[in-house]
Image: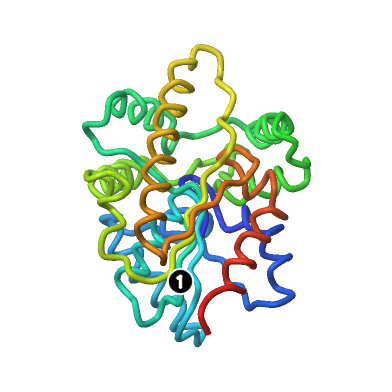
Amino acid sequence: MHGYSRSLTDWDASAALLTAGHRVLAVDLPGHGRSPGISPWTIPAVVQDVAETLDAHGVPEAVVVGHSLGGVVAVEYARANPDRARAAVNLDGFWWGREYPGAERVSEGLLASAGTIAPPEYIEERVITAGRFGIPADRAEAAARGAVRPLSDGKWQTLPERTEALEIFDELHKVFARGVTGWLDGVDGPLLLVQADRQLPPAPGMEWFSEFSARFAQEVSEELTALSSARPTVSVNRIDATHLMTLETPEAVSTQVAEFVRDLPA
């Protein structure tokens, strides 16, 4: 499962590496990619959507893997379906409560571009931006096209649309109201929690966001270290990449997932 405003295309390279030893299913979360939206957009509704997708493909048990928002959904699927989730993998899917210092400013910034109509050159701009992270142009273009809806006038509808974006952020604030440790209470199956080892470089005028992200990442790291020491079912790793890890380093992502699955109890 992909992150917020992304699509299943982000997983193309990693999934291709995993299919040698595993059956892999990738999905567009509701309101993303080619999946229709839902109203309201809630975590329980999305978890049910994932369960129905697995039923439709005849999958009684799965290791659920997600990046960013998809990582949150993966953990919540494991919580709701302990008999069907062999394990869950969360790749850099951590958020903050509504009262976290700076959270309101971040939400305002993210919502400013939610569900907007992008100009025809949008895809080209995304490819150029991705190149700064070492992401190959063909991978970046496919991922950019997968995450938007083409319009008849050559412009692009960015996804999710604004109403769903508001609901998604509201859900994330609720889920993480008690912090990462509190969120993971009651999830008893095996978990792999992975953090990005590098921060996204700041955009001009957004230096404050880099400071926010670094502070939050450090706090999450400390929580995860304590959590993995106290709970043997929780594994914690890092990947030498930014938050864009599925596009930057698909080989490292697939290796971590494959090794985690290999070591699961039979």
Q: Quadrant of residue 105?
A: top left
Relative to 158, 45 lies left or right: left
Q: Nearer the viewer, residue 182 or 177?
A: 182
Q: Is residue 37 above or below residue 4?
A: below
Outermost top residue: 205
Q: Is residue 183 above or below residue 242?
A: below
Residue 62 on image: x %, y % = 49, 77
Residue 142 on image: x %, y % = 69, 49
- Counting labels gives 1
Decide: few, some or many residues near mark 1? Use Cα within 10 Å; few <14, some 14-19, many ≥20: many
Relative to 12, 180 lies left or right: left
Residue 171 on image: x %, y % = 27, 49
Q: Nearer the viewer, residue 182 or 123?
A: 182
Residue shown at 31% from the left, 68% from the top: 79
Q: Is residue 18 above or below residue 242?
A: below
Q: Quadrant of residue 253?
A: bottom right
- Helix, strand, or loop for circle 1? strand
Q: Nearer the viewer, residue 171 or 235?
A: 235
Residue shown at 41% from the left, 36% from the top: 114
Q: Quadrant of residue 52?
A: bottom left
Residue shown at 28% from the left, 53% from the top: 183
Residue shown at 52% from the left, 65% from the top: 27
Relative to 118, 69 lies left or right: left
Badge 1 amino acid? Ala
Q: Which residue is mark 1?
A: 87
Q: Is residue 154 above or below residue 235?
A: above
Residue 71 on image: x %, y % = 45, 55
Colour scheme: rainbow
